[in-house]
Structures are given as structure tokens and as C-alpha cells.
Image: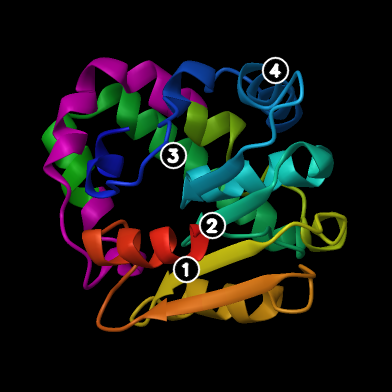
Amino acid sequence: PEIWDEFTIQGIVPVDLWQYSGLSYPKFADQLVEDFASNGRKPILMGYSLGGRLAMNVLSLYPENWSGAVLLSAHSGIADISDKDARLESDLEWARRVREEPWDEVLRAWNEQTVLANSPVWPCVEQLESRREQIAEAFDNWSLGRQVDLKASLGRFTAPVLWITGEDDEKFTQVGREMDGIFRDFQHVIVPNCGHRVVTKDVAATVSAWLE
């Protein structure tokens, strides 16, 4: 939730994903709907990166429970089986490192990934050392290698979608381009001079304007 401190948007309710990390994708979707989108409530669902992937899994299973979605630097899934297997292997190695290696070394290696080039380092993640086991579970249970390719099922979600990626994040910006035509009411905003970590005050202003 700390990363959402930049998002000074009235009514936003940050979700502590780590408390759910022992759940599979479908069970997470069930629980999130029960906690936030039941009994006639139809909020807008927002998620960044892993949170964006989880959000799309929820949207694919419960398309009628949400009045819109804001997805930042998210991935809809991998179609190729060998690529999925490779990603799962990589994520399981990250789970091992999170459990076993010094925390500062884990964070340094994470921030050195190509996908995070031209992105700021978030000091708040240093505070997550006490939640190593939950984070390791997330690498396993929510690996992109375990996620189905959601493109077909997301077509059932008919409410408005705002998709945001950084201009310097070519991989996820391309994913956004591929989603145009999947969602019926879709807007893709590409943030200039920005990498993967697009959770900023300027982007919050963009989201606020879209919500009005």
C-alpha cells in the first residue's frame, strides 16, 4: 500500500496484497470480491504490475462486479507454454532468494532488472523484509507462469478501462497496444519519460481526470 501514497485520489482504498499471497488466482478473486465488491457494491478496480495482473484475473472471473478498471504496467498473460515454464522457473528462484538471501542483496538484484530501467527505486520496499514468506508465496502462487492468458476472457468486461504504461517500458507498452480491441471501452495512456514504475503524482492526476 505504501506505493499508493503518491495517489492522492479521494476514495482510494489500498489493498494489502501480501495478506492474500497464500491463495491461488481463482481463490484470490473470490476473496477480493467478497471483501470489496459484494452486496451491490461495484467499485473501480485499480492495480499496478503484479496488482494489475491480479486485477485482470478478478475482472475475467467477475466482470459484472466492477464499474471500471485502472491497470498500470500490467500483463495479460503468456500464451507460449515453454515461455510460461521458463517464467515459473524464474519466479520460483526469486521465491528462494527472498527466503534465503540477505534482503539488501535481493532488493539490489530486483532493481537491476531490465524492466525496471529508468524507474526510481522505492525506499518503501525496504520495510517489507518482515514479510519475506508472504512475498515468496506470491512469487510462487502468482507467477506469470501460472497465469492463464486472459485476453479471451477479458472481452467479457464491458465497463471502462484505463491502461497506463511508461514510454520507456517498451514491453508493457506493447502489451497495452495488444489490449486495444480486447476491452470494449479502452483508453491507453503512455507516460512520457517514464519506465515501469508509473505510480506518480502526475499519473494520479491523469487517473483523477479519467474518473471524473
Report the Cα–Cα distance between label 2 and label 3. Answer: 27 Å
In percent of width and height, residue 22 lies at 57, 17
Q: Looking at the image, which residue is at 64% across and 62% down? A: 161
In percent of width and height, residue 97 lies at 32, 33
Local secondary structure at mark 3: helix
Local secondary structure at mark 1: strand
Q: Choose the circle earlier in sequence order: 3 or 1.
A: 3
Q: Nearer the viewer, mark 3 or mark 1?
A: 1
Instruction: Please rate how many residues cluster around mark 1, counting C-alpha atoms within 10 Å: few if below 14, some from 14 to 19, many from 20.
Output: many
Local secondary structure at mark 4: helix
Q: Choose the circle earlier in sequence order: 2 or 3.
A: 2
Q: Using the rendered view, name the quadrant where residue 71 is placed.
A: bottom right
Q: Looking at the image, which residue is at 12% across and 42% down? A: 123
Write down the residue under mark 4: 34
Write down the residue under mark 2: 71
Write down the residue under mark 3: 93
Q: Using the rendered view, name the quadrant where residue 194 is placed.
A: bottom left
Amino acid carrying label 2: it is: Leu
Write down the residue under mark 1: 164
143 relative position to 28: left or right: left
Local secondary structure at mark 2: strand
Query: Quick check: is 52 in the magenta stretch?
Result: no
Q: Nearer the viewer, mark 2 or mark 3?
A: 2
Amino acid carrying label 4: it is: Glu
Report the Cα–Cα distance between label 3 and label 1. Answer: 29 Å
Task: Identify the magenta region.
Answer: 110-137
Q: Choose the circle earlier in sequence order: 2 or 4.
A: 4
110 relative position to 190: left or right: left
Are the residues flagged by discs 1 and 4 in contact, CB closer than 8 Å? no
Report the Cα–Cα distance between label 1 and label 4. Answer: 27 Å
